[in-house]
Amino acid sequence: MTTPIIQPSISVKTLSESPNLKSIPSNYVNSDIYPFDIIASKPQDYSNSIPTVDFSLLTSIDPHQRSQAINNLNKACQEWGFFMVVNHGIQESLMKKVIDGMGQASIPLRRKLSFGGTILRSLCNPKFHSPSKPDEYSDIMWEYCEKVRQVTKVLEEYRKPELALGMPPHSDHGLLTLIIQNQVGGLQVQHQSKWIHVNALPNSLLVNTGDHLEIFSNGKYKSNVHKVVVNNTSPRISVAVAHGPSSLEAIVSPASPLVQSETNYIPMKYKDYMEMQQSNQLHQKSILEQVKIQRN
Ligand SMILES: O=C(O)CCC(=O)C(=O)O
Ligand SMILES: [Fe+2]
């Protein structure tokens, strides 16, 4: 069991809109990563070894190419739980509009805090929310989420805008989270107990495997632990779209064909899982541990 940690009682958006805000209240600060530990944490530079998945090969008409790409994806999910997707077919101009719009939407907060390293998170699913400014931004986000959903659908065949000030080590709920970001960096993934800086390939989609993929695969794929460190110089813009089961009422449990002998996770409603995650501070895989069956 993990110790429950008090969650900030108002949303970061509300916080950002409060007229007297001059500094960040301590319970909004991730003590793991603040003050800016981008240098102090010295993640190892193995970034070149982060797996890359060529999406166009996953959908290739050549069965040999497709099977190689599926093996590659399978390996990335098992060994890293994190990978970059290239040749995904989402227009570069659309990705740029999403990043630029998020940059503009975060200006008021950054101005208030004189603080470069804000992160705007956006979830499109199961409910769509988007910053309403700049004009037409929600149409852009809608189009982007639609495109990302199509990519995720293939990857799985296999929303809420929210501002955060860095993120402590955590795994995501849901099956897969697809992220695009500007060039500032700051995302680090855990691999074989080391922190790896993610230097995103140009126009790639970054993909984290989530807790529900771990549960669904009965532990074959482990959800990835990652964190975000911020710096006080350049604005960091990152758009993360989480994908989970299609209904909040869905029961997430190991898929029976993937259970060889024993079920390793307790089934739970998607909605209850999300609520549990939202009412606890993000901390490693603390939520997943509560549904994992412990055996000695
Ligand atoms: O900002 C990022 O790069 C990642 C965000 C993230 O980990 C999350 O939204 O769960
Ligand atoms: Fe995450």
Image (cartoon, helix red, strand yellow):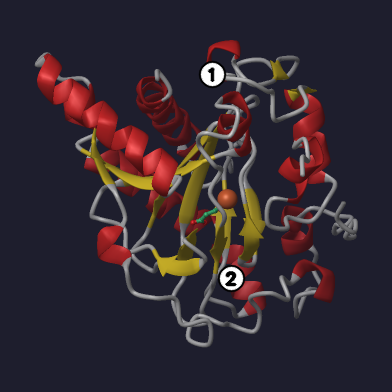
Q: Which residue is mark 2?
A: 110
Residue at image position (47%, 63%) is 187
Residue at image position (39%, 76%) is 44
How many residues crowd around disc 2 within 10 Å: few (fewer than 14), some, or many (20 or more)?
A: some
Question: Would residue 42 be found to the left or right of residue 247 on screen?
Answer: left
Which amino acid, mark 1? Leu
Identify the mark nearer the N-term, 1 or 2. 2
Residue 106 position, x and y percent, is 56, 60
Question: Would residue 119 be found to the left or right of residue 76 on screen?
Answer: right
Which amino acid, mark 2? Arg
Q: Which mark is residue 258?
A: 1
How many residues crowd around disc 1 within 10 Å: few (fewer than 14), some, or many (20 or more)?
A: some
* Vertical side of 141 occupied by 133: above or below: below
Residue at image position (81%, 41%) is 290
> How many numbered dots are placed on residues in this image?
2
Q: Is residue 233 visible?
A: yes
Residue at image position (72%, 29%) is 265
Screen quadrant of the C terminus: top right
| The image quarter in which residue 282 lies | bottom right
Q: Is residue 186 visible?
A: no
Q: Is ligand 1 closer than 8 angstroms to the Cβ of mark 2?
A: no
Between marks 1 and 2, how big is the CA–CA gap? 47 Å
| The image quarter in which residue 48 lies | bottom left
Question: Would residue 29 be found to the left or right of residue 137 on screen?
Answer: right
Q: Nearer the viewer, residue 169 or 259?
A: 259
Residue 237 position, x and y percent, is 46, 59
Residue 171 position, x and y percent, is 61, 49
Q: Secondary structure at mark 2?
A: helix
Q: Nearer the viewer, residue 13 or 134?
A: 13
Q: Viewer-nearest of labels 1 and 2?
A: 1
Q: Secondary structure at mark 1?
A: helix
Query: Are dots 1 and 2 in contact, CB under 8 Å?
Result: no
